[in-house]
Amino acid sequence: MRLRGVSASIAGRHVSHRQLIPIAIGAALLGAFAYGGASAEKGQDRSAAAGESGGTFHVLAVARDFDSIDPAISYTLTSGSLLDPACARLFYYPDRPGKAGFRLTPEVAAGFPRISRDGRTYTFTLRKGVRFSNGAPVQASAFARAFNRTLSPAMKSPGAQYVDSIAGAKDVLAGRATSARGIVAKGLRLVVKFTQPVPDFTARTTMLFFCAVSPTLPIDPEGVSRFPGAGPYYVSQHVLGRRLVLERNRFYRGKRPQHVDRFVVDFAANPADVLDKIEQGAADWGWVPPPFYLDPDRKLAKRFGVNKKQFFVKPGLGLRAFALNTARPLFHNNPQLRRAVNFAVDRAALQRVLGGRLALQITDQYLPPSLPGFTDANIYPPRSHLATARRLAKGHLGDGKAVLYIIDVPEEVPLAQIVKQNLARIGLTVEIEALPPEAYFTRIGMRSEPYDIAWTVWAPDYLDPYTYLNTLLDGRLLKATGNLNFAHFNSAKYNRLMTRAAHLQGRARARAYGKLDIDLAREAAPMVAYAITKAPTLVSKRVGCVVLRGGYFDLGAACLK
């Protein structure tokens, strides 16, 4: 089976927080991608006790989907999945079922950072006794080195965009310095100073770019392939394009799982080979783009059942939506019509076109249901509710015309036809314009672009409600490079509420964002959210301890039966 619409070779890449590029489409066409927290089947929670400790877990990976094991430049889902067990971060998401697995939790940090009143200085205190796989202690210098390696222009790290607001970062990026003056490490104390407030920085530290590394780890544009790890495992062998081996870190004393003795990763030619080997029991797991699991010829759901022992399909973290351009006359200062459109759109029909319930979970809100704080408010029905839509639209239709931009990908164009038919029933005549994928996201990010409705998908590099609500809807980010506020939404009220939520920590932050999500979707309605993409996983018969992180398999938590 081919991945239709977008090349399969790019479908395994992460989506940049600052540039929503077409690789998101490939991952979201029939499934989802994300990485972060954990969720698991109730029946699988008990498998840790049932599984045997030890043994070798066999992974098969597609060589072209693997870029590097070096945390500074690892940026594909395959590489990230393999690196995760060897990575210790300041904060992480624990291997626990349900929303508990998505709660931002200190890992090497002893607790949440102390943040200055102006939001520009973070002070972290590290736990005592954390050690690398070579026995060396993990101190603040390990994270200072991680940040500075990521900023090094020689590394060309995709992670640099997340730390470029650190004081002195631009000097490092320009090659004028080797370390940012805003990073101060002494013993177990790490101070990070920014040129502007970065209220989601604690969540950013969960990314694999910022794993604890040796303070002397060299700058290598090709990426180092063997290095001490501070996570439950470390990279003990790496033969490029042939084999990767992760062994237990015998000095690890943290809370993360450490069930198997080692992970041995071999490389395959294509995703179909990976799935074939897992079905045959020759491999235990391997990352494959979602559409390959849903190939009707494989009949995985029929053969294995869904969410039982081997084949799992869980909601991911990819959001699908139509942005309503509030900078244009039709939707500007017109929340009544924006709500009317939300009631008129037939989300169930959109789901059917894109592969049905195995591919998508219908939603009408902007936060993924798996995030802490999310409450399903059932704001808009799955199918059109024309009576309510017409009542809200009456007197607010403007000239009765709308331009809808859709990406020119075969699977996506039919969505525009459905929306056109839905809105005609409330008095809106929709003109559809299909744009080429290579230009699509740049065009809809421009205020001058004459669209009223625009199709979009979004899945961030790291988990935090900020990356959904603030990134997509905060009007003060409209002038930022790589603007993702395709609704061009700019409300003083909601900007203030988003800022307030962003500066909270822990459960208070989750509650504030959960309430704000409902309020935005119900009252302001700047987007028509219609689906959360799902993520399929297949494992061999001998795999237990199945923990799914944002729908995706948590390799480090696995055990063998």
Image (cartoon, rainbow, N blue to C red):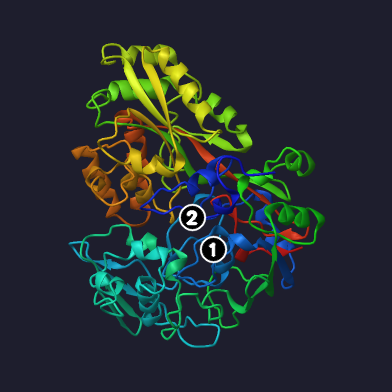
Horizontal side, residue 101 vs residue 498: left or right: right
Residue 157 position (above or below residue 483): below
Q: Residue furthest right?
A: 280
The residue located at (41%, 17%) in the rendering is 423
Horizontal side, residue 307 vs residue 470: left or right: right
Q: Nearer the viewer, mark 2 or mark 1?
A: 2
The amino acid at mark 1 is Gly
Task: Give the image quarter of residue 185.
Answer: bottom left
Nearer to us in this view, 4 or 69: 4
Give the image location of residue 372, x and y in percent.
Answer: 44, 48
Give the image location of residue 556, x and y in percent.
Answer: 61, 66
The amino acid at mark 2 is His
The residue located at (72%, 71%) in the rendering is 53
Please tell me whether mark 1 sits on a helix, a strand or a loop: helix
The numbered dot on residue 329 is: none
Label 2 sits on residue = 14
Give the image location of residue 202, x and y in percent.
Answer: 35, 63
Nearer to us in this view, 357 or 545: 357
Residue 534 position (above or below residue 406): below
Lower position in the chain sequence, tag 2 or tag 1: 2
Horizontal side, residue 491 vs residue 543: left or right: left
Nearer to us in this view, 130 or 192: 192
Distance from Cα at disc 2 to Cα at disc 1: 9 Å
The residue located at (24%, 39%) in the rendering is 494
